[in-house]
Image (spheres, rainbow, N blue to C red):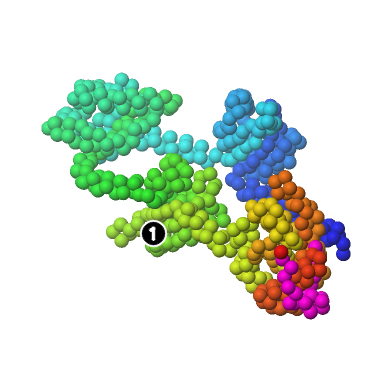
Amino acid sequence: MTDKEVRSGEDSIVRRQAEKALRDSEERYRTMIGNLPGFVYRCENDRDWTMSFISDGCRDITGYAPEDFLHNKKLAFNDVIRPDYREQVWLYVQDCLRQKKSFQHEYPIVVAGGETDHWVWERGKGIFSDSGQLLYIEGFITDITERKQAEETLQNERLLLRTLIDNIPDSIYSKDLACRKTLANLTEVHYLGAKSETDVLGKDDFSLYPQEIAERFFADDQLVMRTGEPVLNREEYILDEKQQKRWLLSSKLPLRNQEGRIVGLVGMGRDITERKRAEEEAQREQAFFDQLVETAPEGIAITDIHSRVMRVNAEFLRMFGYQVDEAIGQDIDDLVAPPALDAEARGISRSTGQGKTILLETIRRRKDGSPIDVSIIAAPVLIAGKQEANYAIYRDITERKQMEQKLEEMATHDFLTGLPNRALLLDRFTIAAALARRNKSKLAVISLDLDKFKSVNDTLGHDAGDQVLKAIGIRLTRIVRASDTFARVGGDEFISVMLGTSRVEDASVMAQKILDSFREPVSVGEHQLHLSTSIGIAMYPDDGEDLETLTKKSDAAMYYSKGHGGNQLKFYSDGDARDNAGFPSARE
C-alpha cells in the first residue's frame, strides 16, 4: 500500500467519525429541544411572524403541528394570537428590536378548536448581521395558563379574606383613601385605649397616636395605596393606653373594589412584645455568627433540606461570581456543579440529607462556566436532634492543584520540548504492552537520533540547538498518531512507541514518514537548517517484551543506520543490524 493510499484511508476514517459526531450532536440537540416545556422558534419580522423553524413542542401548546406554521403552510403564527392582542404584541416587539434588546411578554392565544383562554409567555431576541441588519428573530414560548388561573383565584381569595378579617384575634383595621379608620376590631380598639369602635371610626392616625408614630404610619399608608404593593410583616411599635411601648408584627394591604381600583387599605398587627425581648438576646448571638460566616476565608453555602440555597457568604459570591439574589433559592447543585459532575454533586446532597458529613476535593463551576478546583466539607445542620438544613464549605485550591499539576508534568515531561520523558514513556509502554498481549498484536519501539546535531550547537550555539529540538518535537508530534507516544529521552534522542502494529510494514511506513518530514528545513532565526535523522526499530514481542530490551535493540539498529550514512531506517530484526548490536555510537 502506498503512502497516498494510507493517507486516503485515514482521511476517510476521520471524515466518517466527524460525520457521526455531527449526527450525534444534532440528535442530542433535537432531544434537548424536545424535552423543553414549550417550543423554540425562528421567524421573520413580518406581520405574520413567518416561521422558518419551530420545534415540536408547539403541538402541545397550540394544538397545531410544527409543519402547519412553517412558511405559513396552513396558517401564520399571528393567526393564533388572540385578535385583541395582536397589535399590542407587534408594537412591543418592534420597539425592542429597534433598541436591539431581548423581549419577554405574556399574551392569550387561540388554540386549535377555537378556545381563547390559553395564555403563553414568550422570550426572544433579534439576530443581527455584523452591519446591524436584522436577519431573523429567535425565541422560546411556554404555556402559563395554569399560572394565570391561579393568579385569578388568589385575587378572589384575598378579596374574600378582607371581608372576613373581623374574626381574626389580632389587631385588624381598614382605612379609606384619606387614611381615616373605617373599621377596627376589638384588639385595635384596645391598643388605641378607646372604649368602642365608634370612638375611632373616621379618625386618622394623627388624632390617635403621637406625632412621630402617626407620620410613620401615614407614610406607609400612602406608599401602599399609591403603589398597590402590600407592606408585610413589618415590626413596628405603638404606645398603648399606658404609654408603654408595644411591638407589633404589622402588615398593610391595598383594598380594591370589584373593578380593581384601590379604595383604601387593610391592616393587621400581632403583639410580639414578649418575643421581641427574647429575640434581642438571640440577635446578639446571631450577629456574632453572621460576622464569623461573612468574614470566613472559605465560601459558605447554607441550604434547606431540599438543597435550595438559603444563605451564602461574601467569599462564596466572589469565588463563584454570583450576586446574592442570583444564588438564594437556587438548587446548589444546579448553581455550581458542572454537568459532567452532576451525579457526584447530587450524591453529596443525598448523603448530607441522610445526616452524613462529606469531605472531598473536586471541580465546581463558576457563573461564567469556568472550572474551579475546590475542597468541600458538606454536613447537616442539626437543631435539637432534627435536621433543619445543610451547609457546605468551599475552599479554592486552584493554585495548589496547578502546582501539583506542574510538579507532575515536570516529573513526566521533558522540560525543553514538553514531550513525555522516559518515566512517562515507560508507564505508557507498560499499558500498551498489556493491551498488545490481550489483543495478540505488536508494538513498535522506534529510536531516532538527529544526524550531525553537534555541529548545530558548535556553529550556532546551544540556544539554537534548543530551538531545533523544540521544532523537531512539534513536527514529529504532528506525524505520529494520537494513540502513540513520542518522547525525548535525552540530547537529540527521541523514542516513539507505536500501538496496534499488526504488521512490521506499518512501523516502516511510520518511520518513513518521519524521515520524509526532515526534507523540510528547520528555521532558526535567519538560518534554514537541513537536517536528517537515523532511525532504528524493534518489535514487541518479537525482539523483546520490556522497554529496556526493546530500546537497546532499537538503539542498536539506529546506530547501525547512523554509522552507514544516516538518513535511513533499520529494523533490529535485519541480520546486519542484529550482528552489529555493539556498533559504536556515531553521535557527534
Residue at 27%, 22% in the rendered image: 180
In the rendered structure, does residue 568 fall within the stretch colored magenta?
yes
Residue at 59%, 25% in the rendered image: 99
Residue 110, picture quadrant: top right
In the rendered structure, does residue 165 fall within the stretch colored magenta?
no
Q: Please give left or right for residue 293 compared with residue 209 in the image.
A: right
Q: Please give left or right for residue 409 compared with residue 544 in the image.
A: left
Which amino acid does the dot numbered 1 rest on? Ala
Q: Are there few (<14), some (14-19), or many (20+) residues within 10 Å of tag 1? A: many
Taking 129 as reference, is 568 above or below it?
below
Q: What quarter of the picture does the N terminus occupy? A: bottom right
**Residue situated furthest top in the rendering:** 178
Residue 120 drawn at (x, y percent): 58, 37
Q: Secondary structure at mark 1?
A: strand
Taking 449 as reference, is 91 above or below it?
above
Q: Is residue 27 visible?
A: no
Q: Which residues are magenta?
A: 567-587
Residue at 34%, 33% in the rendered image: 231
Camera-nearest residue between 146 and 72: 72
Residue 208 drawn at (x, y percent): 20, 25
Residue 243 drawn at (x, y percent): 13, 31
Camera-nearest residue between 466 and 384: 466
Taking 226 as reference, is 163 above or below it?
below
Taking 415 as reference, is 260 above or below it?
above
Which SS type dominates the magenta stretch? loop
Q: Please give left or right for residue 199 compared with residue 397 in the image.
A: left
Residue at 68%, 28% in the rendered image: 131
Q: Which residue is mark 1?
A: 379
Q: Is residue 370 visible?
A: yes
- Count the marks: 1
